[in-house]
Image (spheres, rainbow, N blue to C red):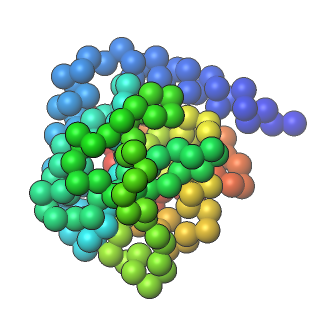
Amino acid sequence: MYDYKSIKQGIRKEILAKRNSLDENTLIDAGSRLSKILSSEDIYLQSDIVLAYASYGSEISTYKFINKALDDKKSVFLPKVVGKDMIFYRISSTEELVLGYKNIPEPTGDSEAYKYDEDKVIRAMILMPGVAFDRCGNRMGYGGGFYDRFLEDKPELQKRSIAFGFGFQMIDTLPCEVFDIKPAKIVCVD
């Protein structure tokens, strides 16, 4: 029997050790480059709604991109963990964020919640965090399954998803399970 859990834990440990060794300036610089890349993507230019997330720890900083989207008058929604689910709430500033689940910055939850509408999703995009990715387009997150559950009944939003990371986060093959949702695009920043 294939032990997905052990294999995924080993990959997470290895990739996170590399990522955690990066200094803050590297993460911020990568965030600036990422913001330029993402804000020139057709999917971004065509979207009025941006579902993003606030980076934390050794993730590439998403703050410059979030602020760019706000400056471009996009409706920006960030996730708040509620039990085993995520609800995306609209923000008007990153200064509104509070520490939430696992000390991840998130909205307070007292603003407009994102409502999936298959007819309007053509004007939306979603960013997905990840620990590792593979050449077949698979993504491995932190193990909570939050994005897989959020996107499982939103096929049109799945087609408008982008994940990103450093080049060293791209490996040859990831173990995948049937419920793992692939991002439509993966961007590597080096």
Q: Residue furthest bottom?
A: 119
Quarter holding residue 179: bottom right
Q: In the rendered image, is residue 162 in sight? A: no
Residue under the image location 51 percent in, 34 percent down: 101
Q: Is residue 145 above or below residue 28?
A: below
**In the image, is 17 to the left or to the right of 4?**
left
Q: Position of residue 129 (x, y in %)?
A: 44, 43
**In the image, is 68 to the left or to the right of 141?**
left
Q: Position of residue 68 (x, y in %)?
A: 16, 53
Q: In the rendered image, is residue 141 in sight? A: yes
Q: Residue furthest left?
A: 71
Quarter holding residue 40: bottom left
**Position of the C terminus by quadrant:** top left
Residue under the image location 48 percent in, 80 percent down: 118
Q: Position of residue 79 (x, y in %)?
A: 44, 49
**In the image, is 182 to the left or to the right of 1?**
left
Front in this rendered view, residue 22 or 146: 146
Q: Position of residue 175 (x, y in %)?
A: 66, 41
Front in this rendered view, residue 24 or 189: 24
Residue under the image location 40 percent in, 32 percent down: 99
Q: Residue furthest front?
A: 110
Residue under the image location 36 percent in, 35 percent down: 98
Q: Is residue 23 above or below residue 4?
A: above
Q: Is residue 68 above or below residue 61?
A: below
**Position of the N terminus by quadrant:** top right
Q: How many marks?
A: 0
